[in-house]
Amino acid sequence: MFFRIAFTLYNRCSVKWLEDLKPGERFVVACNHCSNLDPILIGSFFPRPLRYFAKEELFHSWFLRTAITALGAVPVSRVDNATAASALKSFMKLYREGSDVLIFPEGGRSLDGRLQPLEAGVALIASHENAPILPAYIRGSFEAMPPGATFVKPVRISVTFGKPLRFGPEVYKKRGSREVIMGELTAAMKALESA
């Protein structure tokens, strides 16, 4: 609640939902990533607790550690193939146990504030767990706190939650399902970026 109020007052943060969520439906939330503020923003404005992985360096700062732990973060070492596979399995387990999960499918922060190519881990989680994907887009976090910045600038931020992408068993069980899912997610994220 504190961060929601702080972002609303300091950054004049606005939130837009393109479709109401169905009660009880869990999601893999897929969001662009430009700033260390992003998980705090999404966690503050999503109506339920989210679980997500954050690089362990973020836990060295008292402020960030406090903020992201309160908002569902779990520390993870910087990614090699074994760590990435382990993280994906952990995401699936968290989802299976009843959590909404947040993933940044670009694989890291954008260095120019624009959407980067998406990695297929989100499609693997969605297809393995028959999970709907909720695309989300944050505008302004790059300007408010770009990589390397220590303080948050009072720049206007907006968060848009797109229409959920729901795929039936005919997609999940089909060969090439990850490509179909990633194609639809990429199109949805680009539409949110250009809106």
Image (cartoon, rainbow, N blue to C red):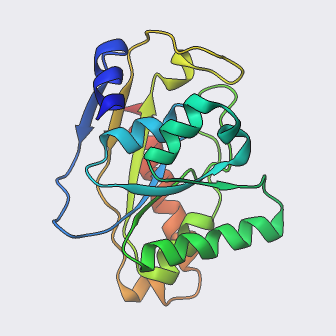
Which of the two residues, 5 or 81, is positioned nearer the viewer here? 5
- Residue 103 at x, y = what percent? 53, 55
- Residue 61 at x, y = what percent? 66, 31
33 to the left or right of 67: right
x 67%, y 50%: residue: 107
Q: Residue 11: in sight, yes or no?
A: yes
x 50%, y 25%: residue: 141
96 to the left or right of 57: left
Name the image quarter holding residue 137: top left
For residue 156, above or below residue 103: above
Name the image quarter holding residue 23: bottom left
x 35%, y 64%: residue: 165
- Residue 2 at x, y = what percent? 32, 30
Name the image quarter holding residue 88: bottom right
Given the current orientation, which residue lies at the most extreme top position? 154
135 to the left or right of 83: left
For residue 160, above or below residue 93: above
For residue 179, above or below residue 110: below
27 to the left or right of 102: left
Q: Residue 114: in sight, yes or no?
A: no
- Residue 15 at x, y = what percent? 27, 33
Which of the two residues, 158 or 115, is positioned nearer the viewer here? 158
For residue 91, above or below residue 153: below
Image quadrant containing the N terminus: top left
Which of the two residues, 164 or 41, is positioned nearer the viewer here? 41
Image quadrant containing the C terminus: top left
Q: What is the tally of numbered marks visible in this picture?
A: 0
